[in-house]
Image: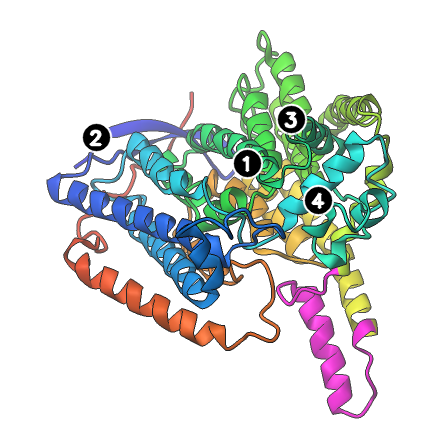
Amino acid sequence: MGKGVAVPDEVNGRPVTRVEATSEPLDNHERRQLDVIRRFGTVGALLLAVGSLGAGAAPVYNPVFGLPVFGLFSRMTTVSLAIAFAGVFMIVLAWLGLGRLAMPGRARMVSLPQMARTLVMWTAPLVLTVPMFSKDVYSYLAQSEIAARGLDPYTVGPAEALGNADVLTKNVPTMWRETPSPYGPLFLVIGRGITWLTGDHVVMGVAFQRLLALFGLAMIVWALPRLARRFGINPVSALWLGAANPLVLFHLVVGVHNEALAIGLMLVGIELGLRRMPRCGPRGPFPPWQPGELLWYGIGATVITLGSVVKIPAALALGFLGVMIARRWGGKWKHLFLTAGPLLVIFLAVVALTSFGSGLGLGWTATLNTANTIKSWMAPMTALGFGAGGLGIMLGLGNHIDASITVSRLVGTVLGPLLAAKLLLDSFRWRLRPMIGLGAAMGAVLVLGATVQPWYLLWAIIPLASAAGHTKFRIVATAISAGLAVALPPTGNTFDGRTFQLPYAYAGAAVVVAIALFVVRKHVPTPPRTRLKPAEPPVPVA
């Protein structure tokens, strides 16, 4: 049985110290299971990398097409798709198996270095893949080129600014060629530097964008365990759910989405902001300001704001950091307003410096809703509009689907921020951990938004992974992550006119995965029979 360790926590808003049992290292049998899981996931990552040669979102001028052996995959798209699906399923299954060895409350569980090494093993092959699941990275390159030419990426799209014949424009999906950039100026400034290094070389541009995404992932990996310890959550479990998550691997690493950079900056900003904060309860005591405490609050707020000028959802974290500072100050309304003032000044100053310092201005604030042109079935409010419009057609009321979607989206646009405000207020009143409030607020705003993509859920899952230890939450988060991980095809395109490929690809992938599972069947972890004793009752901090 593990030894006890004192962990700070809150009970009914009071700061307490609870004695929590810590897990022992894995035994020899479990280490063997971990080795098999690692290799199973690594083989899946290698299969995904190979499958990407023919089933990925390759550029229009695919440099692999004419290469011996490698070029064969682009001519055998169904086979490549089956290989890619097999890789996807194997990674998801390996992640689920790893979760059994990282389950909170186990008598023996994976250590933090073991979890980090597993993440590196699974990520390494994915660094070399063709972009998959989305073609957004090509929009990043085109919009960065627009900025590099001195044009305004917030008023013109790639087709108008670069021309349809430009190699960068040709890789952008048709529906996005006329739309301006929805990304913040910091991201385009970095993109402009990448363009300066790579020019119109698409492959090198994608490689540098992926390096940027990996930098964001490194920030997530750095911040998550530290935040988890701060909020009394097992750091290994937090890293498993928040960083080794298949949604992270597929959409931040393989898909090269800039959420990696934005979420990474947001988490690092929160961790830096809390670095000198003492623990307090609603009834105190509230110690005087510690040396350097105010400076770290300013640094944290600055880094969070930098994340928001990559993608705006990160700005929501500033409100919850303000709640934590106000609670530490005294927890009264005057403290909340006194905290909000300086944070607002920092936010406006950083936004102004990045916007005007980049030469791009504030045009980005008018293009934040560009993605709303997509009518995504994954967005509950859009799906509700489709359903209401379809019901109207069935009842003979005419086709009012567009109007129904507009109304349902409007409801979601109002309801999401209202729920976020309620969660912010509950956090201020000590009814909720602010980090849990942040994750739930992100989920409310994004899920009730006009468009939802699988990687949007990471805005909610990653913060919650650092602060929410409830078993039911982790089961739900695991199910959602695994389901959404396989929801999008790796091609980044629809299968219009070639849906016949899917049954064959799924069948081939199922056979491969079934054989792989049969080979490793003796090494699949089972739910632990022996669990740690419940933690000792909390005792108030003196």
Which of marks 4 and 2 precedes in the sequence? 2
User: How far is the residue under mark 2 from the one under mark 4?
Assistant: 58 Å
Say what amino acid the circle numbered 3 marks: Leu
* Residue nearest the observer in this picture, 515 or 520: 515
* Residue nearest the observer in this picture, 392 or 187: 187
User: How far is the residue under mark 2 from the one under mark 3?
Assistant: 53 Å
Say what amino acid the circle numbered 1 marks: Ala
Residue 353 highlighted magenta (yes or no): no
- The crowding category of the residue bearing disc 1, from other C-alpha atoms within 10 Å (few below 14, some 14 to 19, many at least 20), is some
Which of marks 1 and 3 precedes in the sequence? 3
Residue 398 highlighted magenta (yes or no): yes
User: How far is the residue under mark 3 from the one under mark 4?
Assistant: 15 Å
Which quadrant holds the N terminus? top left
User: How far is the residue under mark 4 from the one under mark 1?
Assistant: 15 Å
Residue 123 at x, y percent in the picture: 41, 40
The image shows residue 57, relative to residue 121, as above or below, that is: below
Tell me which residue sits at (64%, 26%) in the image: 197
Residue linked to disc 4: 168
Tell me which residue sits at (39%, 38%) in the image: 124
Which of the labelled discs sits on residue 3, or is there none?
2
Residues at discs 2 and 4 in contact (Cβ within 8 Å):
no
Which of the labelled discs sits on residue 189, or is there none?
none
Which of marks 3 and 2 precedes in the sequence? 2
| Residue 283 visible in the picture | no
Q: Which residue range is magenta in the image?
A: 374-402
Residue linked to disc 1: 207
Residue linked to disc 3: 197
**Local secondary structure at mark 4:** helix
Residues at discs 4 and 1 in contact (Cβ within 8 Å):
no
Residue 50 at x, y percent in the picture: 40, 52
